[in-house]
């Protein structure tokens, strides 16, 4: 008999087809499956979820046989790792395969803000251009200082893209990093002070919550641009909304939000933000590669082998 697994959010159809071939998949986003979950909760050994969705403590408690939480993403901020470790539950992610696409969205947001890509689209679409309307002049990327907050894989990939656009790269990293020629800042505020664009790439964890606070935003200054491709939690959104409203920073490009997809409504009315629906890894190629890693982790687990990208391996 096929093992029962829970799927928290939809995946690419071809990946879901492969999941269906190997498992009895109970989809939490299908009301008919969700209603009957209690009947099979005891036999669920695997949950597949997204980085943004994770798996609540209550769910972990409801699933006594749970052995693996396979995250279709790299962020584990929505999974209680200590609880998983204590229960002997593996937590797997999809490292490496999404790095470039997330960095691309970072670059897209920088371009969209500085070169007013979305404002231009709105002007043309509304007929405003035909009626003689025009955009104010934009800002060149070349020569601007790009500050990378968190020089992990995604941060490095964005730094390289910035360099290719003629930007001058600096970074802040919590743990000391040697061997990078880019300007190194001692604190997030120092990086912000020395940046025209501050790009948040650091993982969202308890330790990085509100790392970008009012003081960091003030250090970025009235011409500064904040870009976030990591997690909403890294930025104090109250402080960000105030700073955008009061012109204490220039603009923001955001792919991630606290409480997404139901984001703070203020963001939708502010003129100086470009908004994206957490689409960093959302390409066919990357979602396929991520899905394959999820499938590999599941098949290893059900075959009694160690899942290849178990982040709690060393327990
Ligand atoms: C995905 C992510 O959008 O990797 C992550 O942590 O948040 C994104 O890549 C997400 O995991 C899919 O739900």
Image: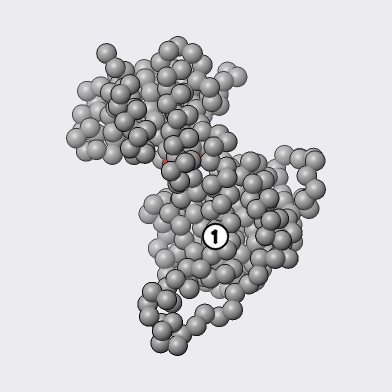
| Residue at 61% from the left image edge and 64% from the top image edge | 225
104 left or right, relative to 62: right
In the image, is residue 110 above or below residue 60? Answer: below
Image quadrant occupied by the N terminus: top left
Work out whether residue 75 can be spotted. no
Residue 261 percent location from the top left of the image:
39, 52
Residue furthest bottom as drawn: 132
Image quadrant occupied by the C terminus: top right
72 left or right, relative to 149: left
Q: Which residue is mark 1?
A: 109
In the image, is residue 201 above or below residue 61? Answer: below
Observer-nearest of 280 and 150: 280
82 left or right, relative to 173: left
Asked if ligand 1 lies within 8 A of label 1, the reply is no
| Residue at 44% from the left image edge and 37% from the top image edge | 288
Residue 38 percent location from the top left of the image:
24, 26
| Residue at 49% from the left image edge and 26% from the top image edge | 91
In the image, is residue 30 above or below residue 196? Answer: above
| Residue at 54% from the left image edge and 60% from the top image edge | 109
Residue 103 percent location from the top left of the image:
58, 49
Rendered image quadrant of residue 199: bottom right
């Amino acid at each position: 008999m096929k093992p029962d697994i829970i799927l928290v959010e939809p995946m690419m159809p071809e990946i879901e087809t492969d999941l269906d071939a190997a498992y009895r998949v109970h989809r939490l986003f299908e009301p008919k499956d969700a209603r009957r979950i209690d009947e099979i909760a005891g036999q669920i050994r695997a949950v597949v979820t997204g980085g943004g969705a994770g798996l609540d403590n209550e769910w972990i408690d409801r699933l006594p046989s749970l052995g693996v939480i396979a995250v279709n993403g790299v962020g584990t901020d929505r999974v209680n790792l200590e609880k998983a470790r204590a229960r002997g539950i593996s937590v797997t992610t999809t490292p490496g395969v999404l790095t470039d696409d997330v960095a691309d969205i970072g670059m897209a947001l920088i371009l969209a803000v500085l070169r007013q890509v979305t404002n231009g689209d709105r002007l043309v679409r509304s007929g405003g251009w035909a009626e003689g309307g025009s955009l104010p002049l934009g800002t060149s990327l070349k020569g601007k200082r790009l500050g990378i907050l968190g020089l992990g894989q995604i941060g490095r990939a964005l730094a390289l893209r910035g360099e290719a656009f003629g930007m001058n790269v600096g970074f802040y990293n919590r743990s000391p990093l040697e061997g990078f020629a880019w300007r190194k800042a001692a604190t997030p505020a120092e990086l912000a002070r020395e940046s025209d664009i501050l790009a948040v790439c650091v993982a969202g964890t308890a330790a990085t919550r509100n790392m970008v606070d009012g003081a960091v935003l003030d250090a970025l200054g009235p011409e500064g641009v904040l870009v976030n491709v990591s997690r909403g939690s890294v930025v104090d959104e109250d402080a960000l909304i105030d700073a955008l409203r009061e012109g204490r920073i220039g603009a923001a490009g955001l792919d991630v939000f606290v409480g997404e997809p139901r984001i703070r409504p203020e963001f939708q009315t502010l003129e100086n933000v470009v908004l994206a629906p957490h689409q960093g890894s959302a390409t066919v190629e990357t979602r396929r590669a991520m899905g394959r890693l999820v499938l590999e982790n599941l098949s290893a687990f059900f075959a009694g082998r160690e899942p290849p990208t178990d982040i709690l391996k060393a327990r």
